[in-house]
Amino acid sequence: MPKTIVCIKQAVDVTEIKVDSATRQPIIVDAPRKISEFDKNALEEGVRLKERLGGEVVAVTATSEDAKMILREALAMGADKAYSISDPSLEESDTLATSYVLCKAVKKIGEFDLILCGEASVDSYSAQVGPRLAERLGIPQITYVRKLSFDGEAVTAERSLEECYETVKAKTPVLLTVTGEINEPKIPSLMAIMKASKKPIVEWNMEDLKISKDEVGRAGSAIQVTEVLAPKVERKSITINGETPEEVAEKLAKALIKEGVVGG
Amino acid sequence: MSEYSGVWVFSENMDLMLELLGKGSELAKKLQTEPAAVLLGHNVKGKTDELFGYGADKVYVVDDPLFKESGSEPYVSGLTSLAQQYKPEILLIGSTRRGKELASRVASRLKTGCVPDCTHLSIDEDRRLLMGRVVYGGNAVATEICRVKPQIATVPPRVFEKLEYKERKGEVVDVNVELEKPRTKVVEVKEIEAAKVKIEEAEIVVAGGRGVEKKEDFKILDELATILGGQVAYTRPLCEDRKWFTDWIGLSGHAISPSLYIGCGISGVIQHVAGIRDSKLIVAINKDPEAPIFEVADYIVEGDLYEIVPALSKALKKLLKTR
């Protein structure tokens, strides 16, 4: 019966980001937060394994913000228990620092068979925390998994690479990062949401994990972001109108020929 | 003078490695240091001349039969050991999925940072590498620096150009490294049927989205693509939700920069737009006047793709024939 730890990120909902038109800076503070998309796939996969084989699924997140909302959602989706590692000192942490915090947390959680992560987060899209966490824990890893099975001792996973699908075996404990292809996360039922409110959320801060403040945040990170600006959009925005589809099509065809992009 | 010097490049994909070498040479020149390539494999010595010809002053070679086994640990441990021993200032790694995993793991072992999928790389007045990349689902471009060395960046295919080939000599550095054995075992490999031309290389792309109701209806788009000498491409929902295809355009898929992109029945969520942003000309055909793709389009056609696309094919056929 597998014990699975799923790492989830409280990500910025990138579809809701507004841009300050004067400074071209995206306004991140006001954008809503949500569970990073592929992390939901990771959680769903953990829950499905539990439904087939028994065991336990716990969700863990590390953030400078309050993350109880997304952890409640994780519990509603089927996790048995959640760990909230929330500490203001985590602000500006890069993947080096974040993987360190998760490593400490995983060690404190104790024995496990599988760690599941999303292939990358929707907002920063680094695809590094999973691979770095496995390195820090000294366990094997399989990235970009689109199909997964577990026989009690080893996992068999199909990886989605650019030019091939590669089926890989590894003994547990093992860390896997999953792609969006692996499953369709279920939307929790009202019953599941109500049950989730009774499930435990364990809260840890840096002191609980014996991490000093200069090991995380800006001080503990190798990467610093010096500038974030919305890309400039300079498009023609020409609307093609016409009485009939044929008339529209002809106008468009002529425009494309005039642009020199077709018929060259 | 820092003890770290040299700009290194590595990719398991030779074409991509040569592109990295093009940019790497430019950065090395600015830093007045040497551009070098890393070759990891078995019987790979034959490739050193090509790397010299495309800009490498040095090629570090680890030649070991262990690389034939397909696990990633030999690569991770090989590249890590080389970097520990020779201390490059900058390490550029090809941003394939394998490359991204490798870069993260090497960066973790070297306790340094890694900026993924860089589309801009330059050196500032303090000799630091400025790394630019798309973040927040295409809403912004971030510039990042790495305070620890080596400064690691991954670079996607076709962002930078390789240099012109010149007959050149360079130094081969053979290195013996204690490699770790693979901890995972590859039991099967299924090749993914490659499109006729890689979508990144297509000059004209006709893309279909959720507005295309049935898979068979793609024949309308196929016809237009054929007339234009272009390729058909897809959005993520068609691949992940409807399972019609395997490869999509967008942030999590392929990023393209054709001279003409025609989006048919595509709403234009920012993750998709992030993948088409560098197209020279964007045409959007959509029934929905509110479709966000119209905001990034050069030509906006508010209409039914089932009417517009066949009519466009017909019009182009006629106009192109008479020229």
Image: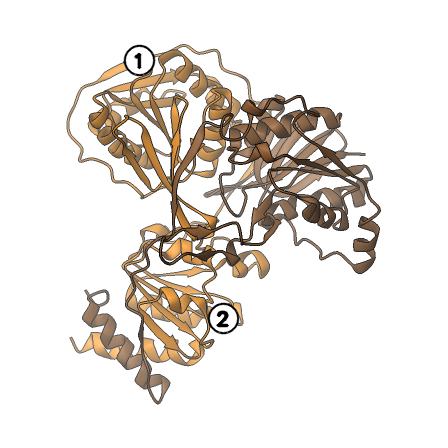
The chain whose colour is brown is: A
The CA distance from mark 2 to mark 1 is 55 Å
Crowding at dot 1, Cα within 10 Å, few <14 / some 14-19 / many 20+, comes out as few
Q: Secondary structure at mark 2?
A: loop
Query: Hey, what amino acid is under mark 1?
Result: Val
Q: Residue at x 43, y 55 (%)?
A: B249
What chain does mark 2 sit on?
B
Q: Residue at x 40, y 73 (%)?
A: B285
The chain whose colour is orange is: B
Q: Residue at x 40, y 78 (%)?
A: B302
Residue B169 as seen in the image, left or right of residue A83: left
The extreme bottom residue here reads: A243
In x, y percent, where is residue A208?
A: 71, 25
In x, y percent, where is residue A209?
A: 68, 24
- The quadrant the C terminus of chain B occupies is bottom left
Pointer 2 or 1: first along the chain: 1
**Across the whole image, how many numbered discs are drawn on residues?**
2
The color scheme shown is by chain
Q: Nearer the viewer, residue B210 or B186?
A: B210
Q: Residue at x 71, y 35 (%)?
A: A5
Tags 2 and 1 on a common chain? yes
Residue B184 in sight in this render: no
Residue with the mark numbered 1: B173
Query: Hey, what amino acid is under mark 2?
Result: Val
